Image: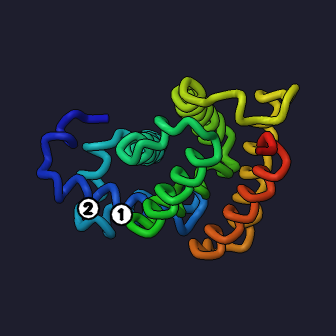
Amino acid sequence: MNGKFFSLPEERQKAILNAGYRVFSQNSYKNSPMSEIAQAAGISKSLLFHYFHNKKELYLHLWDNCAKLTIEYLTRYDCYSQKGLFESMERGMEVKLEICRLYPDMANFAIRAFYEKDPEINAAVQESYHRYFNLKADKARINFDSAQFIPGLDIPMMYREMYWASEGYLWEMTQRGDVDIDQMKRDFEKLLEFWKSIYLRRQ
């Protein structure tokens, strides 16, 4: 990336990023032309290539920006300071859904990017995702009291099971083509109540 992008006024940076989110959220990576992104941002294609050397660089910058914003929001709303796992998850769910409402194109982009089929892009996104995911999980686990769970529970397996279930749900939502935020909230609330009934120690 050309460092001159960061010397642009904040509003101009946002216009370019939002244009990228909008175009990439509506199409696959392969079918998202830089010319369309430039037009949506109100700049020439040559200028867009001046800031980002190629489409992949822009795409991964958008993904990284999305991941960092999510971490920032989760930290700001104390999602990592909760002693109870499901309290943290509930708060995190509310934060992520709020991000979806505030930045709908970015949220749709993130879901589509996670399942992007282009091999080169998929590998880079998955590597980045698991790096951020592990960071979030490690920060959260520091505060969790294992006594909240049923005796003998395989906690790492529990984390993986919940992750796999969430991943499968997001895949199903992306296949529908229209992400319904309110429906996602209801579905995740049901999932959380189900997990609580299985994993939490009875009082």
Q: Is there a contact, CB below 8 Å, between mark 2 and mark 1?
A: yes
Image vertical order of residue 7 relative to residue 99, above or below: above
Residue 37 at x, y percent in the picture = 38, 62
Label 1: element kind: helix
Identified at 23% across, 51% down, the residue is 47
Question: Looking at the rendering, which quadrant does residue 152 occupy?
Answer: top right
| Number of residue marks | 2
Tell me if 145 is positioned left or right of 23 in this view.
Answer: right
In this rendered view, identify the residue nearer to me: 48 or 110. 110
Image vertical order of residue 55 relative to residue 148, above or below: below
Can residue 124 be seen in the rendering of this structure?
A: no
Residue underneath mark 1: 19
Tell me if 113 is positioned left or right of 68 in this view.
Answer: right
Q: CA distance from mark 2 to mark 1?
A: 6 Å
Residue underneath mark 2: 15
Q: Quadrant of the N terminus?
A: top left
In this rendered view, identify the residue nearer to me: 147 or 134. 147
